[in-house]
Image (spheres, grey):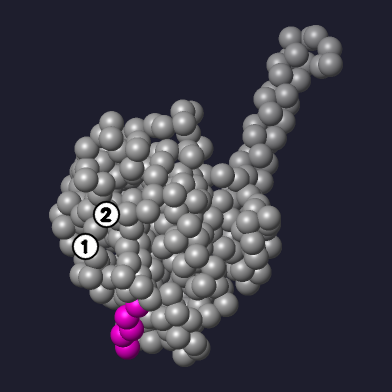
Amino acid sequence: MLPLVSIVIPVYNASLFVAETIESTLKQSYQNIELILVDDGSEDNSYEIAKQYESPNVTVVKQANKGASAARNYGIRLAKGDYVQFLDADDFLHPQKIEYQLNTLKAYSDLHLIGGTWQRFIKNLDQLYGEVAPSTRQEVQCFNNVDWLIKRPMMIPNTWLVSKKLINLVGPWDEQISLNDDGEYFYRVIAASAGVVIDRKAATYYRSFNNSSLSSRNGRKAMLSWIQSIQSYKKILCQVAGDKGNNSVDEFFYLLSYWCLNEFPDLVQVCKSEMYQPEKTFVLEDKLVYRLSKFVGLSKAKYFRTSLSTIKQHALIKYLIQKIKFAIGKPAY
């Protein structure tokens, strides 16, 4: 018997997009699916639009506004499937995404977590942009779950197809986390899995808006949510990787400290206190990096500083060579 796949979609003020998203799921080549839409207290007519698609295999429910994690947990409780596909209400799946992943999983166990690739778009799939992620050497590739957690490649929740066994092992989404809630949840799933399998053909498309998603991350509550999610990551990595994960944890907190830099200096100190080696990793006191980062971003500022250090080293070596040649009576050039 073919496994049933439950597609769980939290919906909040998505009236412009939810119909397209529903239709992308109903066009899946793999047809043994159920669709569960949970409206999270939308203030527009998202719920009414979704209700138009209700059928024996499409369930539409609503709840008071509690956040996307609570909506996903509601959807999981309703799900009858052997596997769960999480999907945001404004994103798309490749028409064969689920079919590809289920076929690939035949060579693995249902405790393996299978993902795919993803790419950004603006209005429609004719406007794809950016790199396809993640980059893999083979069309289908299996990764050690601990190695994946340490390297932490950027993924979106829509890429994964999760077995109900894994979902039952890790428990519900953390409803106290409002940002990076998907990251925190899938850290737990990956840690509990037998490995991470990536099928390049199984594509997902992530809608990006002109107003950067970072604009919703600049409040204090948002930053605290990020800190909480990374604290969870730190705890998980400590359990499964020991000291091997320390650098990855430090890099994560360092990145977050940069986001907090200008508005929440006290949270910078919180991030610093969570690092294993803050004296090695934490270079925000470097005035050059600090000043440049405000204009060109942290990564470019650090690159410029490294390049400048290299130039200085070469200049010093050249100067010393000239001095030595002068001392032994040879031409300096």
* Image spot of residue 55 (x, y percent): 36, 73
Span highlighted in magenta in the image: 60-64
* Image spot of residue 32 (x, y percent): 32, 54
Residue 49 or 329: which is nearer the viewer? 49
Q: Measured along the vertical axis of the image, is residue 190 above or below residue 51?
A: above
* Mark 1 Cα-neighbour bin, 10 Å: few <14, some 14–19, many ≥20: some
Magenta stretch prevailing secondary structure: strand
- Split into 4 quadrants, where in the image is the N terminus? top left
Residue located at (17% from left, 51% from top) = 165
Q: Measured along the vertical axis of the image, is residue 242 above or below residue 89?
A: above
* Residue behind mark 1: 80
Magenta-colored stretch includes residue 240? no
Circle 1 sits in a helix, a strand or a loop, which is it?
loop
* Residue behind mark 2: 4
Q: Is residue 176 left or right of residue 306?
A: left
Task: Assess whether mark 2 and mark 1 are in contact (beta carbons under 8 angstroms).
Answer: yes
Three-letter code, disc 2: Leu
User: Which label's residue is closer to the chain start, 1 or 2?
Assistant: 2
* Image spot of residue 244 (x, y percent): 28, 38
Three-letter code, disc 1: Lys
Residue 117 or 192: which is nearer the viewer? 117
Q: Measured along the vertical axis of the image, is residue 242 above or below residue 176?
A: above
Residue 274 at least partly seen: no
Q: CA distance from mark 1 to mark 2?
A: 7 Å
* Image spot of residue 176 (x, y percent): 28, 75
